[in-house]
Image (cartoon, grey):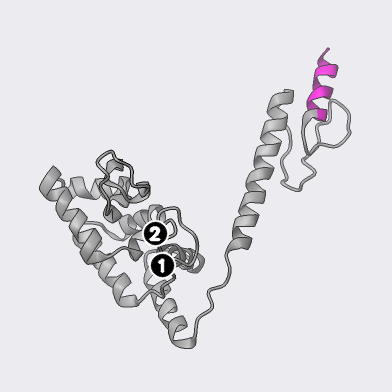
Amino acid sequence: MLGRSMAVGVSSCKHSVSCSPLALPACSSLCGFNHIVHTSETQSYRCYSKCTVRKWRKNSVEQIQPVLLDDDHKKTWEECKEILCALSFSVDEADTILRKAFGWVHSPYWGEERRKEVPKGQIVDEMLGYLKDLGLNDEDLHKLLKKFPEVLGCSLADEVRTNVSMLEKDWSIKGKVLRNLLLRNPKVLGYNVDCKGDCMAQCTRCWVRF
């Protein structure tokens, strides 16, 4: 019965090849996963799950197209990347943050409203400087931007400052409490809609999520 059960487990895996019931093969899709649990459901799920993740990552990378800019805009883009690299981001990570923040790749946060924009070093500096004034250090900014890179594309005057003032005025959230909130839920900095329960289909930027 044991041999029969294990044989069924091997044949059920989407990526396995014909083999002895006692010699479970590596996945043939090159994910490098070796089966180690001898139950048919677990083998099939674990192998397929890891291969699917690898395929998704590969396709996601392929969808990111180069940002084509003239020399002046390219220089500005590089300056912004240098600012982010000073926060311990790699060059590729800094590039991805700018793409998400300024509309060069699709972000569920923006929906369809964000147009492509070339970031300016002054704007990035002002946003980071303001966040530092709220009590966030470089390590905090690194964590915040990992969670919410789009904050760099938000309006400092009309959204970020306004929302911080609202948090302080309406909920008395400031100082260390504010810092902890921003690290936990940085998207609050970009909320600009309050549907009050009557959905406006802008949920990613709505105060109802707070």
Q: Residue type at mark 1: give it.
A: Phe
Can residue 174 be found in the magenta stretch? no
In-front residue for pair 81/62 = 62
The dominant secondary structure in magenta is: helix
**The N terminus is located in which quarter?**
top right
Report helix, strand or loop for mark 1: loop
Identity of the amino acid at label 2? Pro
> SS of the residue at dot 2?
helix
Q: Is residue 174 visible?
A: no
Residue displayed at 13% across by 49% down? 168
Q: Return the residue nearer the eye: 137 or 128.
A: 128
- Mark toward the start of the polypeptide (1 vs 2): 1
Residue 166 lies left or right of residue 47; in this view the side is left
Residue beneath disc 2: 149
Residue extent of the magenta highlight: 1-11
Position of residue 138 in the picture relative to residue 30 (left or right): left
* The magenta stretch spans residue 7: yes
- Give x and y (percent) for residue 116: 44, 70
Residue 180's label in the rendered image is none
Q: Is residue 128 above or below residue 2?
A: below
Q: Which mark is residue 102?
A: 1
Nearer the observer, disc 1 or disc 2? 1
Give residue 137's position: percent from left, percent from top: 27, 59
